[in-house]
Image (spheres, helix red, strand yellow):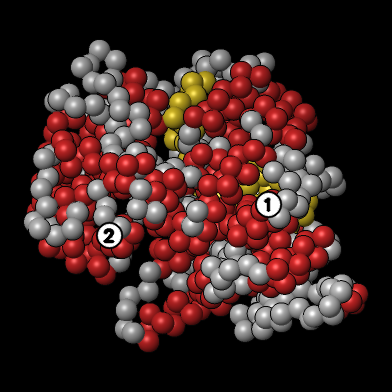
């Protein structure tokens, strides 16, 4: 069958759009900017199918799960001439087999780096661990860059917090020397190597790949090292992605789509969601007009899903998600199954190995129960918080916030979440799926509930105005990525999106596909309403204690500071009168979140008291 007749058959079978057909018929190096849900994988598969059967084609996927799914789809299409790889799997095959290298799959913990390099403090608290933390981050920065030497980079460019910057300036030579020494030890196989190391070594070896075509997916999240390998190949190159889905800046991703001098083509029709959600996505992206140069894009929504079988709550941060999940299971007592994308343990353990339970043990002064060496080295929570400030460790910061908020209640809370969590094989049973926006990338759900911890239009304006008022540079890159995170969250929805009103663009029209979650105003404390007969409940006619500033709630804002202010009565003793009020409110089917606000305590404290009163199911 000729190439042209094959193309005619493809078009007839799949009803490809004009944009998809233009891509399939393209010649030479091509950049494809594809909006969310636009069928880019399908398009790339048909592009490969339209090439000669004798062509050697490499498809570069973003991660292992995407690789497995793409391999299946190429195989179903009968394309045996396509080799599916990730950048790391490709690099591994070239660098590791036949060498003396062994892989340290989970990477090096901070205390391990300190021990390997025999770092010593200068009398300051935990100086050696802070230096080790920055060495770990500098290695990540270098391995993902396209530079040949560590000295070609300025690590300070990656540090934002003033306290952390001051520390790095003071110890820069120690950090740079330690980075070079640890990399040298890996290179000589004196110690195990990391995944980032062999990718970097692959890039520096200037490999020549034996392919006629290289199709690079999710190009917006490529590192400079990956892009360098790709651009140096003699093959016909196609890079596809969505510039507005770049959300891995913390892993030093670069906007690869804008760094190529290729022909530009578009995929602007989304088959995932209807036009109302497409309009909302465009409205949020229009906030970028306040940043640097922004070229408006068109998104045509042609999704027509009518059913809701999968529901997902998506948050910007681990902390926001954990608080939302806690609220969900305590306010929905009949829920039987929940699911966390990426497994629930990934939300309670940091990449370095520390857990919420380690931080809780430090909080209680139980050093003997701390497993992580770094946390065990801390004398107090103050020490840990000082370490976090000097290293910008976001994961540890989240854990400290959770422990400071819930204290010893966290053990029971996590146990409750785990008891309801289903395994991968029973994911379809979940009444609610919980995910951060990073873990939800590439996923889609019938209904999406956004947590109120994303950037809003007012927060964006405030950030810009504050920077201008203080004559500080505006962090356009960070603000751009924050908008991207909200865009990715919105575009996971197929049929219905539940969005806090604070996250809507100004004067945005609502629709049946967009449900607005009314949020409390900051100046209006939360309150809930009880039945009129409440006043007659107690035989002695005593009135309930009225706590100021409460309002009926349907959804909560996830501000730790606000919760601390509200929960000022958290440790006051329970009285018989309070117990009686608690029992009534609980049996009147009021949400636990509202009950907690009424008593000025955390929901964990409310659950704990109800259990002691033998009226809360275990």
User: For this rendering, which residue is in front, 483 or 351?
Assistant: 351
Front residue (pair 309, 505): 309
Which comes before the other along the chain, label 2 or label 1? 2
Extreme residue in the bottom direction: 469
Residue 396, image x, y percentages: 38, 53
Residue drawn at the location 70% of the way across and 68% of the way down = 576
> Is residue 353 toward the left or the right of residue 525 in the image?
left
Quarter where residue 535 is shown: bottom right
Identify the image quadrant of residue 207: top left
Measuring from the top left, give residue 502's x and y in whole percent: 64, 72
- Which of discs 2 and 1 lies nearer the camera? The answer is 1
Residue at 61%, 72% in the rendered image: 600
Quadrant in which the N terminus appears: top right
Q: Which residue is mark 2?
A: 383
Q: Residue at x 61, y 80 (%)?
A: 522
Q: Badge 1: how crowded within 10 Å, few (<14), some, or many (20+)? A: few
Q: Is residue 104 visible?
A: yes
Percent across and percent down for residue 481 are: 47, 60
- Please rate how many residues cluster around mark 2, counting C-alpha atoms within 10 Å: few if below 14, some from 14 to 19, many from 20: some
Q: Is 484 above or below relative to 348?
A: below
Give SS at disc 2: helix
């Amino acid at each position: 069958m000729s190439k042209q007749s094959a193309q005619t058959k493809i078009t007839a079978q799949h009803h490809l759009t004009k944009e998809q057909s233009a891509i399939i018929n393209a010649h030479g190096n091509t950049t494809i900017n594809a909006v969310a849900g636009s069928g880019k994988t399908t398009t790339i598969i048909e592009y490969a199918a339209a090439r000669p059967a004798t062509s050697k084609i490499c498809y570069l996927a973003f991660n292992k799960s995407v690789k497995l799914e793409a391999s299946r789809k190429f195989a179903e299409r009968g394309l045996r001439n396509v080799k599916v790889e990730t950048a790391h799997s490709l690099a591994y095959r070239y660098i590791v087999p036949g060498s003396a290298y062994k892989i340290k799959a989970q990477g090096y913990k901070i205390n391990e780096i300190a021990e390997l390099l025999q770092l010593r403090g200068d009398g300051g608290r935990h100086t050696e661990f802070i230096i080790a933390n920055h060495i770990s981050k500098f290695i990540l920065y270098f391995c993902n860059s396209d530079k040949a030497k560590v000295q070609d980079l300025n690590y300070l460019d990656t540090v934002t917090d003033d306290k952390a910057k001051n520390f790095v300036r003071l110890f820069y030579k120690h950090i740079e020397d330690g980075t070079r020494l640890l990399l040298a030890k890996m290179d000589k196989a004196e110690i195990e190597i990391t995944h980032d190391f062999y990718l970097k070594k692959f890039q520096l070896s200037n490999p020549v790949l034996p392919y006629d075509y290289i199709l690079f997916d999710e190009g917006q999240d490529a590192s400079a090292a990956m892009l360098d390998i790709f651009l140096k190949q003699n093959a016909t190159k196609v890079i596809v992605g969505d510039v507005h889905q770049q959300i891995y800046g913390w892993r030093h991703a670069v906007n690869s789509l804008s760094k190529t001098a290729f022909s530009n083509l578009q995929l602007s029709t989304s088959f995932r969601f209807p036009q109302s959600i497409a309009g909302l996505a465009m409205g949020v992206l229009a906030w970028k007009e306040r940043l640097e140069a922004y070229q408006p894009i068109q998104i045509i929504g042609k999704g027509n899903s009518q059913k809701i079988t999968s529901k997902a709550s998506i948050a910007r941060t681990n902390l926001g998600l954990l608080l939302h999940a806690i609220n969900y299971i305590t306010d929905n007592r009949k829920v039987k199954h929940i699911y966390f994308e990426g497994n629930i343990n990934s939300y309670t353990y940091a990449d370095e190995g520390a857990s919420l339970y380690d931080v809780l043990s430090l909080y209680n002064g139980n050093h003997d129960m701390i497993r992580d060496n770094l946390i065990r080295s801390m004398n107090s929570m103050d020490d840990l918080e000082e370490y976090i400030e000097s290293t910008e460790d976001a994961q540890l910061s989240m854990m400290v916030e959770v422990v400071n908020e819930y204290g010893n209640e966290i053990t029971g809370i996590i146990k409750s979440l785990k008891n309801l969590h289903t395994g991968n094989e029973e994911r379809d049973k979940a009444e609610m799926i919980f995910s951060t926006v990073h873990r939800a990338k590439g996923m889609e759900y019938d209904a999406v509930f956004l947590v109120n911890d994303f950037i809003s239009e007012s927060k964006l304006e405030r950030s810009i105005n504050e920077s201008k008022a203080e004559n500080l540079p505006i962090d356009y890159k960070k603000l751009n990525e924050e908008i991207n995170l909200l865009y990715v969250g919105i575009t996971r929805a197929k049929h219905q999106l539940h969005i806090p009103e604070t996250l809507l663009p100004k004067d945005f029209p609502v629709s049946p596909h967009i449900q607005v979650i009314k949020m409390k105003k900051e100046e209006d404390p939360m309150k809930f309403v009880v039945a009129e007969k409440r006043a007659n409940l107690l035989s002695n006619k005593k009135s309930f204690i009225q706590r100021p500033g409460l309002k009926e709630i349907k959804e909560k804002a996830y501000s730790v500071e606000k919760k601390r202010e509200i929960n000022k009565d958290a440790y006051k003793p329970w009285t018989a009168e309070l117990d009686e009020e608690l029992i009534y409110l609980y049996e009147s089917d009021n949400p636990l979140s509202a009950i907690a606000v009424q008593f000025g305590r955390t929901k964990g404290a409310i659950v704990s008291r109800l259990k002691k009163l033998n009226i809360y199911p275990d």
